[in-house]
Amino acid sequence: MSNTSAIKEHMEVVGADGVHIGTVDKVEGDRIKLTKKDSGEGSHRGHHHFISTGLIAEVEGDKVWLSANADVAVSFEEEKDRQGI
């Protein structure tokens, strides 16, 4: 896992295959909170999704590169806050 302090608001999150996954809203603990505009379609639309920082391969320039291809990485997305856990 890369140093999360290098992750800044509005950075692009991409899979290992270079496919866009989302845009960083902020880092919350061990997760990257993605902006609502990248929230998907249907019931996924209109709320934040989260990606585990454990999937980060590296932070380079204005991109956060994940260790998994985009189609695999989105299967690990979380849709809700883990408040109270």
Image (cartoon, rainbow, N blue to C red):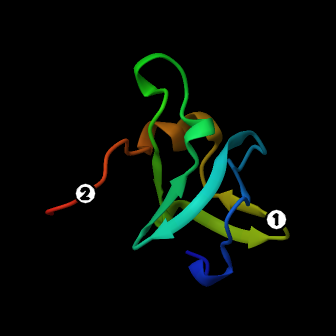
Give the answer, above or below, for where 41 lies relative to 20. above
Give the answer, above or below, for where 58 lies relative to 25. below
Three-letter amino acid code at the position of disc 2: Arg
**Quadrant of residue 28 in the image?**
bottom left
Question: Which residue is rendered at x = 69% and y = 70% of the image?
Answer: 58
Per the image, label 1 sits on a secondary structure element best described as loop
Cα–Cα gap, marks 2 and 1: 27 Å
Give the answer, above or below, for where 14 lies relative to 5. above
Whether pointer 2 and pointer 1 mark residues with C-beta atoms closer than 8 Å, the reply is: no
Residue labelled with disc 2: 82
Three-letter amino acid code at the position of disc 1: Asp
Q: Farthest residue in the top direction?
A: 42
Residue 56 image offset from top left, x and y in percent: 59, 65
Say left or right for 83 vs 27.
Answer: left
**The disc label shown at residue 79, or none:** none
Residue 40 image offset from top left, x and y in percent: 55, 28
Residue 58 vs residue 32, the one in the foreground: 32
Image quadrant where one finds the C terminus: bottom left
Per the image, label 2 sits on a secondary structure element best described as loop
Residue labelled with disc 1: 62
Image quadrant where one finds the N terminus: bottom right
Question: Which residue is rendered at x = 54% and y = 44% of the image?
Answer: 73
Say left or right for 9 vs 41.
Answer: right
Q: Farthest residue in the right direction?
A: 61
Residue 10 image offset from top left, x and y in percent: 72, 59
**Quadrant of residue 43 in the image?**
top left
Question: Which residue is rendered at x = 72% and y = 71% of the image?
Answer: 59
